[in-house]
Image: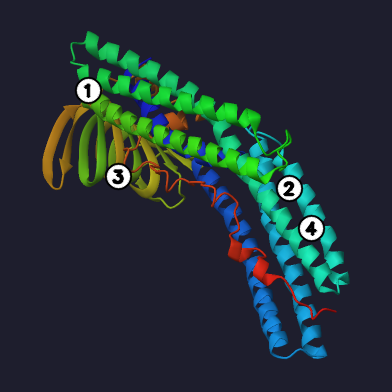
Amino acid sequence: MNEKKNTLMIVAFAKATVIMLLLGLFAPALAYADTPHEQYQAFKEQYQISQERVRDAQQSYQDSKEKFLDAKAHLEDSRTSGTIFGLKNATRVFLLHTIDYIIIRLEVMEDCAIKAEGSGFAPFIASDNTKDYIDQLEGMKDDVEAAETREEFQAIFNEIRDIWQHANLESRYFILGTANNRVDSFLKRGESISDRIKAEIERLADAGVDTTELERLQYEYNDALKDVENSYNKATQLFDEHNGFDDSGVFEDAEDAGGFLDEASGLMGETQQQLKDGNSVLREIFSELKEHRHGSADLSGTGKLIASGDGKATMSGDMEAKISARGGILTITDYDGNAEVDVTGYGTKEYIGDGIVRYSGFDGTAGISGSSVTVEILGDDIELTAEGIGSVILRGYGTYDVEKDGCHTSSNDWAPPHAEDMNQNHAGDMNQDQAGDMNQDQAGDMNQDQAGDMNQDQAGDMNQDQAGDMDQDQTPDENSAVDTGGS
C-alpha cells in the first residue's frame, strides 16, 4: 500500500474513532444523505424538529404544573367546593399535559431506536418496548378524564411515573449496549490501521530513516487497543447477563438494573478514555509520518502555503485558496454549502452532485473560500496560495514554501506523481467517479486540531443523565401528589 494511502487512512481513523462510537448510534437516520454536508444537515434538521416538539410539550407541562400548584395552594387557604373543583380540574389538566409530554419524549426515543436498530448493533428491539409504553399512556387519558377522588388521581400519577422510569432505564440499557456492540468494529479497524502503520514504519526503515520514535508510538497505540479490548470483553459479559432486564430489554428489578447500569456505565467510560488515548497516539504517529513525506503540509490558521508546479494539488479544510493553472481540471467540493467561488477561464462547468463542481479545460484563475471545502487542481503551470486551517497535498513536479506568522518555516519539493494523475491530466478524460472520488479517507486530510476533533465532552457524551433522561423537575414528583379535598 502506498505511503499516501497509509497515512491518510491513519489520520481518518484518528478523527473518526471517538466520534463514531458515540454518534454512530444514530447514523442510520442519515443513510439517505450521501455527502457529509447532507448528512450533517439532515441530522441537524431532525434534531431541531424533535427539540421543538419537546420544548412545546415541556412548556405546556410546566404551565399546567404551575396552575395545579396554585390551585393546591388555594385549597389549603380555603377549603370550599369551589377550590376543590378548581383543584380537580387543574389536576386533570396537569396529568393530561404530563402524559402528552412523556409521550413526545418517548416518540423521540422510539424514532432514534428504530434507526439505531437498523445498524445491526442494537442489543434488543427497544422501539417495540417504547411503543407499548406510549400505548399505555394514551389509554390512561380516559382514566384521567374519569377520575374524581384523590386516590384515583394518585393511582394514575404513580402509573405515569413508573412508566417513565421504566422507559428511561431501558433507554439507558439500549444506548450503552448499542455503543458497546460498536466497539468490536472499531477494534478491527484499529488493528487494520496498526498493520498499515507497521508497513509504513518498515518502508521508512528500509529507506534509512530512524524509526525508533515511530516504533515506540506504535507499541503505545497497540497497548491502547488491548486496553479497549479488555474493557470491551468485560462489558460484553455484563451485557450478556443484563441483570434487572429480561431478554427483550424490559425492566424487571430496580436494584439489579441499577447495579448493572452503573457497572456498564463505568466500563463504557473506561472504553471512551482508552479510545481517546489511542486517538492521541495516532495524532503523534501522524505528525511523525508527515515529517517524512514530501508534498504535504498542514495549516493551523496563521500559516500560508505558496506552491508552483505541474501535477495535482489537493487542499482540504477551512481555508481560502487562490489558484492559476494551464490546461487543467479544477474540482471543488463544498461540504458546508457556504463556499465562495470565483473562476475565470474554463471550457466547461459541470455539477457532479453532492456539492461537487468540476471545471474542465481550466486555463485561468480561481479564488475559493469556505468553512469545509476540498479543492483539487490537476494541470500544468499551477500557481497556488492557501491560507486557513487544513492540509495541502502536492503531487507532481514543483516546489512549495510554508510560512507561519509571517515567517518562512520550510521549503520542499512536491511528492512524486501517480501515473494515473498524469494520464488524467494529459488525456483530459476524468469520468465522474474519478473526478469526484472524495471518500472520507481521501477528502478529509485536514490537520488534527481542526478536522472534526470532538473530544468526549463535545461528541455527544451520552452519560446516563443525558441519554434520554427527564430530570425530576420535569416528571411528576411525590410533592405533586394531589389532595382533591377528599371527595
Would you place residue 190 above or below residue 160 in this image?
above
**Residue drawn 25% across the image and 44% down it:** 300
Q: What SS does tag 2 mark? A: helix
Quadrant position of the C terminus in the picture: bottom right
Question: How many residues crowd around disc 4 within 10 Å: few (fewer than 14), some, or many (20 or more)?
Answer: many
**Residue drawn 67% across the image and 83% down it:** 70
Q: Amino acid at mark 1?
A: His
Residue contact between numbered discs 1 and 3, judged by CB atoms under 8 Å = no
Question: Which mark is on residue 389?
Answer: 3
The Cα–Cα distance between marks 1 and 3, rounded to whole angstroms, is: 21 Å
Q: 187 or 419, which lies in front?
A: 187
Q: What SS does tag 4 mark? A: helix
Image quadrant of residue 32?
A: top right
- Residue at numbered disc 1: 292
Would you place residue 351 above or below residue 77 in this image?
above
Q: In the image, is 316 to the left or to the right of 16? A: left
